[in-house]
Amino acid sequence: MTLLDVSIVNVALPSIKQGMHASEAELQWILSGYALTFGLVLVPAGRLGDARSRRAVFMTGLALFTAASAAAGIAPAMTWLVLARLVQGVAGGILNPQVAGLIQQLFRGGERGRAFGALGAVIGIATAAGPLLGGGIIALAGPAQGWRWVFYVNIPVGVAALFLAWRLLPPPARGEKQGLDPPGVLLLGAGVVCVLLPLVQEQQWHGNRKWLLLLAGALLIAAFAWWERRARAPMVDLGLFRLRSYALGTAIALLYFAGFTAIFFIFTLYLQNGLGYSALEAGLAITPFAVGSGVAAAVGGRIVARYGRPLVAAGLVVVTVGLAAAWLAVELEPGRGVGVATALPLLFAGCGSGLVIAPNQTITLSQVDFAQGGSAAGVLQTGQRVGTAMGIAATGSVFFSALASTHGDWPGAFRRGLVVVLALVVLALAAALADLAAGRRARSAALAQREAQEHGQAREGC
């Protein structure tokens, strides 16, 4: 539900503009405000779940998300709607890290991989199917008021999920409660806002001064790292980044989400604004990616324990080939038939994506103690949100610049944006290959050390 609301609102923007007479800046804040507050609270919420009760924090976030969805649906004015979206983002950021933390707590070994496979299938389907569901709802409810039902649909789901969470999720274990590190929360929160704000507002804020916020964000995050090394009860154990699987897995997630989510942003714009597709038609065109991602994620979760990081690298290769084929399809069929022409390439790329997201999350968190599962997942997901904002800003900048310079060549602008997406996916592949190379070196060193020990013991025996 929370990830669906990242993408479902994209296709609802024309309906919101028509029904609420919204400005471009207000429409942008409906998207960027959600992303901003979502990323802001991920790590503190993960820490809170670790320190207190993951079930209680999950249910709090879920109740708040459901209430904010209702508030967004009944919004009488744009200011109300934007504020409801900000609260929705906070709620999504509160409950999301608890899921990975609970998987860490409840599952071990191959079962944990299958659980993350189920989560990966949900992530892939929710992100890619959002435009289809949003388009279907607007087609049924009408363009003027259909956007309200995009939010109302969360209410019954949220109520049912609250009941199930109360019945099924485990209560907190008794024991000493951990500290919450308020200075760390403030430093990291300010740093994340300074990094995300110029990225999510890249199209609305003109001029280059906004990029000074990135420098301020880097300084604040450096101050956060300095504080965490000295804090008695740090919010994030920075020793996690000494684990190769965690450090490189987080880098892969950041880079992959930068490309993976940007493709839907520019493809939806191309189909709806460039080719005149309806919201439902645009959603259907993206569905092959969702189908491939959902199926492959479930499979990837079952086999990740056997194949490890090579599975992620193979998935990234498949995504690269699929997106390159989509680029070629747009070159050969730039007109209204592009939805059909790109169906097979997107299905192929979706299969690769399913082998990346869930297996990478499983491997990244594999060496993390379950007591730190929520905060570790929060850091990982913050990286994904930052990557998403970076990818949309970079790809959108190239896309809109190409559109302006070519006086409305939508297929050409889409192909140029797709080159940026491909570059980001290739960088994620490079990080996966670096992890594979480091793993081989570590195994070779361990083997050489063991052989030296056995040789020394043999000499002593003689």
Image: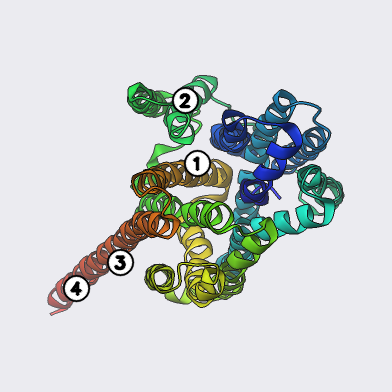
Q: CA distance from mark 4 to mark 3?
A: 32 Å
Q: Of marks 1 and 2, which one's residue comes earlier in the chain?
A: 2
Front-lying residue, 267 or 110: 267
Residue 462 visible somewhere in the drawing: yes
Characterize the local packing of mark 2: few (<14), some (14-19) or many (20 or more) Cα atoms within 10 angstroms. few
Which amino acid is tagged 1?
A: Thr
Characterize the local packing of mark 3: few (<14), some (14-19) or many (20 or more) Cα atoms within 10 angstroms. some
Q: Which mark is residue 233?
A: none
Secondary structure at badge 2 equals loop
Q: Image point 30% across, 66% down: which residue?
A: 436
Q: Nearer the viewer, mark 2 or mark 4?
A: 2
Secondary structure at badge 4 equals helix
Which amino acid is tagged 2?
A: Arg
Q: Is residue 160 left or right of residue 443?
A: right
Q: Of marks 2 and 4, which one's residue comes earlier in the chain?
A: 2
Q: Vertical placement of 26 versus 246: above or below?
A: above
Q: Of marks 4 and 3, which one's residue comes earlier in the chain?
A: 3
Residue 106 visible somewhere in the drawing: no
Secondary structure at badge 3 equals helix
- Horizontal and vertical percent position of residue 311: 42, 72
Q: Nearer the viewer, mark 1 or mark 2?
A: 1
| Marks 1 & 3, CB-CB < 8 Å contact | no
Q: Image point 75% across, 59% down: which residue?
A: 136
Residue indicated by mark 4: 457
Secondary structure at badge 1 equals helix
Q: Which mark is residue 436?
A: 3
